[in-house]
Image (tube, grey):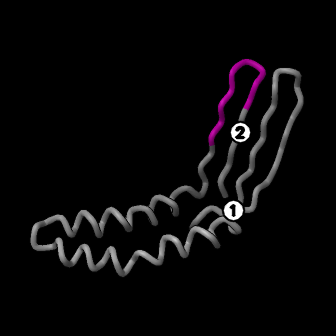
């Protein structure tokens, strides 16, 4: 499943905290058509290049992008140095 919410939490050395939730589904509404429109062209290029052995690479490489986006859900990044912290969660 693609991530729908980005949670950011930042704390600086003075102890001030900043916390924000960003709705990613609004961004996916824009990005998804940009990823879906080239599918016929990618399939055509893969069919043309298939006899040379590069068609599989084109086909597999393009659809790996969708697998990569889908695997981002649940990603947590925690960066800290001393009293400064940055924490990010994709849900």
Residue at image point 51% right, 61% down:
69
Quarter holding residue 81: top right
Which type of secondary structure does the marked residue at label 2 adopt? strand
Number of marks in picture: 2
Which type of secondary structure does the marked residue at label 1 adopt? loop
**Residue 43 higher or lower than 28, as above or below:** below
**Residue 77 higher or lower than 3, as above or below:** above
Residue at image point 59% right, 49% down:
75
What are the residue bounds of the magenta stretch?
Answer: 77-85
Residue 83 lies in the magenta-colored region: yes
Residue at image point 38% right, 62% down:
64
- Alpha-carbon span between mark 1 and mark 2: 17 Å
Q: Residue furthest top?
A: 82
Identify the residue position indicated by label 1 in the image: 24
Looking at the rendering, in which quadrant would you find the C terminus?
Answer: bottom right
Q: Is residue 39 left or right of residue 30?
A: left
**Marks 1 and 2: which is nearer the front?**
1
Identify the residue position indicated by label 2 in the image: 87
Residue 52: where, in percent of width, then height?
A: 10, 67
Residue 72 lies in the magenta-colored region: no
Quarter holding residue 83: top right
Contact, mark 1 vs mark 2 (Cβ under 8 Å) = no
* Mark 2 Cα-neighbour bin, 10 Å: few <14, some 14–19, many ≥20: some
Residue 26: where, in percent of width, then height?
A: 71, 68
């Amino acid at each position: 499943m693609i991530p729908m919410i980005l949670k950011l939490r930042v704390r600086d050395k003075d102890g001030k905290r900043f916390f924000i939730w960003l709705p990613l589904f609004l961004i996916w509404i824009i990005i998804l058509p940009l990823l879906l429109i080239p599918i016929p062209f990618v399939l055509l290029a893969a069919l043309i290049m298939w006899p040379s052995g590069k068609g599989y690479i084109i086909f597999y490489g393009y659809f790996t992008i969708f697998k990569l986006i889908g695997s981002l859900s649940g990603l947590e990044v925690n960066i800290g140095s001393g009293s400064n912290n940055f924490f990010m969660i994709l849900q």
